Amino acid sequence: MRRNYRKASQIVSLGALAIVLIIGGTLAYFNQDLSASNVFLTGKYDTDLHEEFKPPGDWQPGVEIPKKVDIKNKGNVDVVAVARMTEICVRKEDVFITTYETVDGRKTERQEKVASKGDVLPLQFEDSDGTQQEFALKNFGSDVVPYAEAKSSEEYRNKWVYTYDENSKAYYFIYMGLIEGGNTSPGLLESVTMNPRAQATVTHTKLVSDYDKENKKDRYTFSYDTNSFGYDSAEYRLNITAKTVQATKDAVDEVLTGNREMVPENFDKLAASLKEMCR
């Protein structure tokens, strides 16, 4: 009887061990925790319409005023650029002239207004010889060239190309190249000169004094000519706006193509060529 009891005990113990091993085996799956962290640094987009200009207080015909304008790319993203230039000349105060007349044989003075504050003056005028003259003569940079449809876009590479639109009275510019990060475009403008043929409002004054023998009195006569667009006492404004966009085909399409405020229709061919230079 004892012998059988020991065998039964051994069988029970082995069974218990087998149960433990089975439970332990269900927890032993192979597993790993995996992760990946990717950092994307965006480009620095920073462009600046840079100018060197000291406004004059007494601008006169024939005087050249330095005004240097270019576009600086201070970031690290290549860009393309277009620009627009408008101008206006407005009289900033009334213009008077001292005239003379004879009253009881005596010369008397009076002030006569010959031009009014707020008059918008023409940007072009007809000279005495009949030629059309531009009031403000722009000295563009050495890499600024007028647009000629007959030329291929390749001939304009890395130059500013400009055209003038009579309807909007504006100059339009497109830079046919990429302004790389840290670089500056060629100069757009160098200086502006008031046309030496520009005239003042009052011209050719003449005062004549003589003696009226019949009435035994001094007699004075005064005459003058006026120029309807005289440029004295005026304020001339030259406004330049520019737009830059990252140098990718999609960006050029989205921002510049069809943007008539900055890109006139006759520049569409140039804009298409510029797009091909981009990524």
Image (spheres, rainbow, N blue to C red):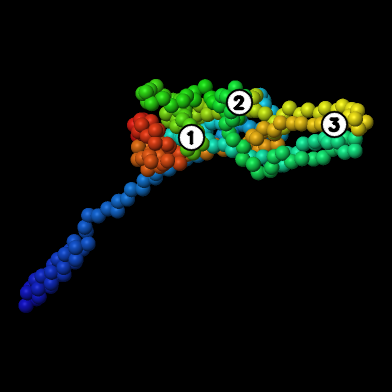
30 above or below 166? below
Q: Position of residue 142 (x, y in %)?
A: 52, 22
Tell me, yes or no, whether the two marked residues, 1 and 3, touch with CB atoms within 8 Å: no
User: Mark 1 or mark 2, which has the lower sequence index?
Assistant: 2
- Nearer the observer, 62 or 82: 62
Tell me, yes or no, whether the two marked residues, 3 and 2, touch with CB atoms within 8 Å: no
12 above or below 190? below
Q: Quick check: 5 left or right of 192?
A: left
Residue at which label 3 appears? 220
Residue at point 41%, 25% (across, down):
148
Q: Quadrant of the N terminus?
A: bottom left
Residue 65 location, quadrant: top right
Residue at which label 2 appears? 127
Q: Position of residue 158 (x, y in %)?
A: 44, 25
Q: Secondary structure at mark 3?
A: strand
Residue at which label 1 appears? 166
- Amino acid type indicated by mark 3: Tyr
Q: Residues within 10 Å of mark 1 (few under 14, many from 20)?
A: few
